[in-house]
Amino acid sequence: MTSWTQYPPRIQFKRQKYQVLAGSWTVNGKQIGAPWDYKTSEEHLVYEHVFTLNSVMFNDDVRTVLHFEAVDQVCDVYINDVQMAHHEGGYLPFSFDISAVCLPGENRLRVEVSDTLRQDFPYGKQCAKPHGMWYTPVSGIWQPVWLEAVPKKNEIRGIRMTPDLTGIDLEIDTDADRVAIRVNSPHINFRLVTLEKKLRINVPEPRLWSPDDPYLYDIFLETDGDRVQSYFALRTVSLQNVDGYLRFCLNGQPLFLHGVLDQGYWGENAYLPAGYGDYLEEAKAMKALGFNCIRKHIKIEHEAFYYFCDYTGLLVIQDMVNSGRYSFMRDTVLPTVFGNCLGDARKKSADAERRQRFETDMRRTMALLYNHPCVVGYTIFNEGWGQFESDRMYDIAKAQDPTRFIDSTSGWFAQHKSDVQSEHIYFRNKRLKAKSPDKFLLLSECGGYTRPVEGHVQADKKKYGYGEADSEDALTEKIETMYRKMVFPSIPEGLCGCIYTQNADVEGEVNGLYTADRQVCKVDAERMRAIAEKLRSISPYGEAQKSSLKTVRVVAAVIHDGGKIYATQRGYGEFKDGWEFPGGKIEENESPEEAVVREIREELDVEVEPERLLTTIEYDYPKFHLSMDCFACRIKRGHPTLLEHEAARWLTKEQLDEVAWLPADITLIGQIRDEWEELVSEQVEIPQPKSFSDLTFER
């Protein structure tokens, strides 16, 4: 079980001294455990908790800061009967210094919450009377609460990291005279003491972050008094003209956004999963179906969600959380039938306070997520919900973050300014075409076919979706038909991405790829992966379109035994000293399976049994194009003896980054991480912080 008390808070800005306030709480006089585990829709709540500060958390050198990750919707916070904070809005974290009223030993915390689903605050998909695409509301403290010991001297208040393909531009918010910076990876050991608060860090032999290779660099910053840990990735997001259309590009190369809509509901657990590891399992499940992108729909998640998307290489399009009144006829029926029939001029009557609150929350959301490489774009308004002055809001968002794309009006009610031609298509399969030279075409919602699974549906909910299927085969067939008739033929007409509705069922909305409890995958996973492979093959995304070099076909053996895999260090040629999976060229009239058996016998003097093809790597070296079939293998007979290589290592999952892999082999590492448990045939629990190196940043 990956308890929230085990998750290190603020993993992108982590200090060592913190205390999660779990244990015994009361709410409205009722004894409970951690408040975020208590699910309720009550309008008025009073939480009480007694916590004890030790000498680490309470001394003359530190300030005691209290953090709330999310409280819905309006709250007042008291420490030892002194009011310390008033907060409005249910989706963003807030914190404040409580040192002045804290006592050594026991302290009393009281949080008074009011949640009447006021529509001048962000409320997302919450509804007092849940139905269809509107869900049960969540009130009160729904994310962890924790204390942090923050140094009084030379505090590092924040960092901002802007990556490109060779390094990062780093901004440090501190009053300290100097900052020591350290970046660690197998390829770099960067150390610097600087007087500058804005500086450039160039990374030698840069390893780029992508869905196929989500590589993260650890970074440590230290002043005379403070020390924080974080991470970054090297990647760029751009919009470039490719084959006559504006295309989404990652690291300068066109990438099709093969995505799924994610509402962020977790069955009986409502807004927050039972443990942080559920976010990891969700990301792995979506990648296993072939997806490379999630549209996080009208909800801000706990930071663990974004970390695991960073870690697994799952791109994120982040929606802002809507406020304002919703009209089914005006905001859904009319535009679904008649298209972009209304502008947002009608929204000018929205009161100034609500508009200002939405703008402030948008700015805070973008600041909160800026350092996460997984986030590649933002949606401001969805289907007109609460929409106002969308051109002005685009200007604000683009000025704050020009490194990502902005979808101002997802679905309809488009005005002038947006990076995206954003279409929602349900109930039909329509061939699409890009209309503007300065916007890329994104099918930002589609599909949504229902398939209720007996025993995994809330019985009191009316079934809701956009077309019906009664079996795994029927649902998969509907999805395949949609891609075949609408998505595939639209790519040559400029389509750059497709967001399928949705990842999992939510209450009565049973159009997920998984059931709400995540226990049943409702589609054929192999056929879903075939859709993803087809998307990768269509120009301009097909590998064959990218290389005119001579192709060299080889095999590689990922040999596993006892929970480890075998890596060898090359002792010859242009790539001497680089690490690789052993293997070699496929000879004429030889199958890949035969080649891998022969090559390993010649290189290591052992007999291996190829179990399955993991993947085929396509990689352009300067002088040739490499096509490498990679097989999972077991040793049948013998013990490895180095006949050609200069060194070898058996590596655990945590040790994969300890060797300098050759470029083509690097692209396989991400998949090996994702499939590690299946590859080594071990039943491994979701990683805990002590073994999950990227959570603790310790090498």
Image: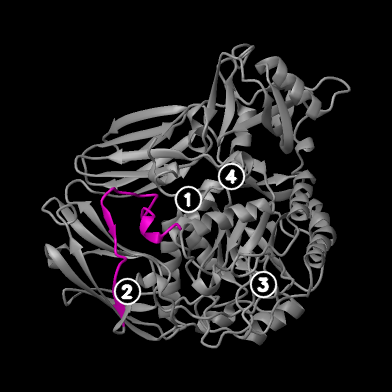
In this rendering, does residue 439 appear at all? no
Q: Please tell me which residue lies in front, 557 or 657.
A: 557
Q: Which residue is mark 3?
A: 412
- Residue 446 place in picture, x, y as percent: 72, 67
- Point 81% across, 64% down: residue: 473
Q: Which residue is mark 1?
A: 372
Query: Which residue, as the protein is rendered here, is positioned at the far right?
Result: 589
Task: Please report whichever mark, 2 or 1, sits nearer to the chain's N-terminal start.
Answer: 2
The answer for how far apart the CA atoms under marks 3 and 4 are is 43 Å
Q: Which one is in front in this view, the residue at disc 2 or the one at disc 3?
A: 2
* Residue 201 colored in magenta in the image: no
The answer for how far apart the CA atoms under marks 2 and 4 are is 43 Å
**Amino acid, disc 4:** Glu
**Amino acid, disc 2:** His
- Point 24% across, 37% down: residue: 178
The answer for how far apart the CA atoms under marks 2 and 3 are is 33 Å
The answer for how far apart the CA atoms under marks 2 and 1 are is 25 Å
The answer for how far apart the CA atoms under marks 1 and 3 are is 28 Å
**Amino acid, disc 3:** Trp
Q: Which residue is mark 4?
A: 677
Q: Which residue is mark 2?
A: 87
Task: Please report whichever mark, 2 or 4, sits nearer to the chain's N-terminal start.
Answer: 2
**SS class of the residue under badge 1?**
loop
Q: Which one is in front in this view, the residue at disc 4 or the one at disc 1?
A: 4
- Point 62% across, 20% down: residue: 639
**Amino acid, disc 1:** His
Q: Identify the magenta region.
A: 1-27
Q: Quadrant of the C terminus?
A: top left
